Structure formats: C-alpha cells, structure tokens
Image (tube, helix red, strand yellow):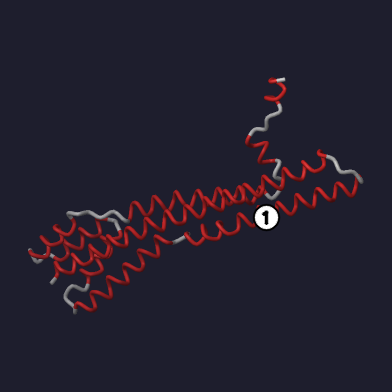
Amino acid sequence: MLQIAVSQELSFFQLVSKGGPIMVPIVLLLIIALYIFVERWIYIAQNSKVNPSLIGSIKTGLHDGNVNSAMALCENERSSMGRIYGQGLKVISRPMSEMDRHMEDAASIELSAMESKLGILGIIAGVAPMLGFIGTISGVIKIFYKISLEDNISIGIISGGLYEKMITSGAGLIVGVLAYTFLHLLQGKIDGFLLKMQRQVLEFKNLLL
C-alpha cells in the first residue's frame, strides 16, 4: 500500500502541468519577475555605493586648485554619487543655485535609472493573480462541460477541473506575492540610497562653501 501511495505522488512539474495552458503565462511572469529582481538588485547595489573617502579626495583636489583632478576622481568612481558630484564640479565657478539645479537634475536621473523596470514588477503583481482567477473560471467551466456531456456527476469529473482551478489560483497568487515583495524590497533599497545621497550632497555643499 505504501509503495502504491508513493508511486501516485505528483512531481512538481506534473503538478504544474495539471494547471493547464494558463500556467504558461504565469510561469513566464515568474521568470520575468525573478530576472528583473536580480538585475535591478545588482544594478542598484553597484551604483548606490558611497565611498567615504571620495569627499576628502575632492577636497584635496580643490584645495590644490585642480578641479580637473577632482572631476576625474568622480568619473573613476563609477557610481551615482560620483556622477552627481561631477555635475556639481562642472559648474563650480557659477552661482550655488545653478550648481544645486545641476546636482538635482543628476540625482533625478540616477534615481529614475534605479527605478527603471520596477513598474513591470507592479504590473506582474496585479496580473498574475488575475490569470490565476481566469484559470479558476476555466476549471469550473471544464467541470460543468464534462458533466453536460456525460450527464453524470462523479469525483473523477469534478477533480479534473479542480486540479486546474486550485493550481492556477495558487500559482497566480504566489507569483503576485513574489512580484509585490520584489518591488518593495527594491524600492526600500532605493529609498535607503536616497537618504544617503541627501546627506552626501549636503556634505559636498558644505565643502564648497
């Protein structure tokens, strides 16, 4: 009896296949969500780095009267803060208000670059559960269609449609929850960088003043 029970257990892929055609877009949405999360996490981690010694190096270059050296340091940093500092240094001889505007524009561009593709995660978080719901409707329709053909209500007929109904609903909800979680994890990382950026820009302005 034990051997029979074990042999009848469904593998993960068999279970997914029971969900029917609607599982294809749900799985595709999961792959897209995972790709965006990993790609954005790496991009944000690389560009949100704050080198604590960069301000000191810029200060040294400016005290020596070598603005080009300070700008080269910012370019070599290859981070959002380096590019923001670089925009400020480009107009260092102009009024502070103009420098503020240049640095704010640079900061907006950097934040927009980090937030790129996050909207797709929001779409997936909303669409995946709806696809699961469509699978639920499809499963119910399949049950009643088979009943109408065979004029018989049996566990076998009902269970076939319930497989599709429950699997697609569960899969859609799981993908939706994952996409929603990924979105807010990335947004939290960006918000953390925004706070650090504001502190660093203030320190940079104090240095110039």
Instruction: Name the one closer to the observer, 12 or 2.
Output: 2
Quadrant of the rendered structure where residue 86 is? bottom left
Mark 1: few/some/many CA within 10 Å (<14, 14-19, 20+) = many
Is residue 132 left or right of 177 when viewed as pictured?
right
Say how many tags the image has.
1
**Residue marked by disc 1:** 133
* Residue 158 position within the rendered picture, expressed as x and y whole percent measured from the top left: 80, 43
* Residue 179 position within the rendered picture, expressed as x and y whole percent measured from the top left: 52, 53
Quadrant of the rendered structure where residue 14 is? top right
Element marked by disc 1: helix
Quick check: 161 above or below 201? above
Which residue is drawn at the image coordinates 22% and 62% (left, top)?
200
Is residue 29 left or right of 146 when viewed as pictured?
left
Which residue is drawn at the image coordinates 21% and 67% (left, top)?
202
Q: Quadrant of the C terminus?
A: bottom left
* Residue 105 position within the rendered picture, expressed as x and y whole percent measured from the top left: 32, 72
Amino acid carrying mark 1 in the image? Phe
Which residue is drawn at the image coordinates 81% and 39% (left, top)?
155
Farthest left residue?
64
Instruction: Name the one closer to the observer, 22 or 158.
Output: 158
Quick check: 98 above or below 63? below
Is residue 16 left or right of 140 when viewed as pictured?
left
Q: Quadrant of the N terminus?
A: top right
Quadrant of the rendered structure where residue 206 is? bottom left
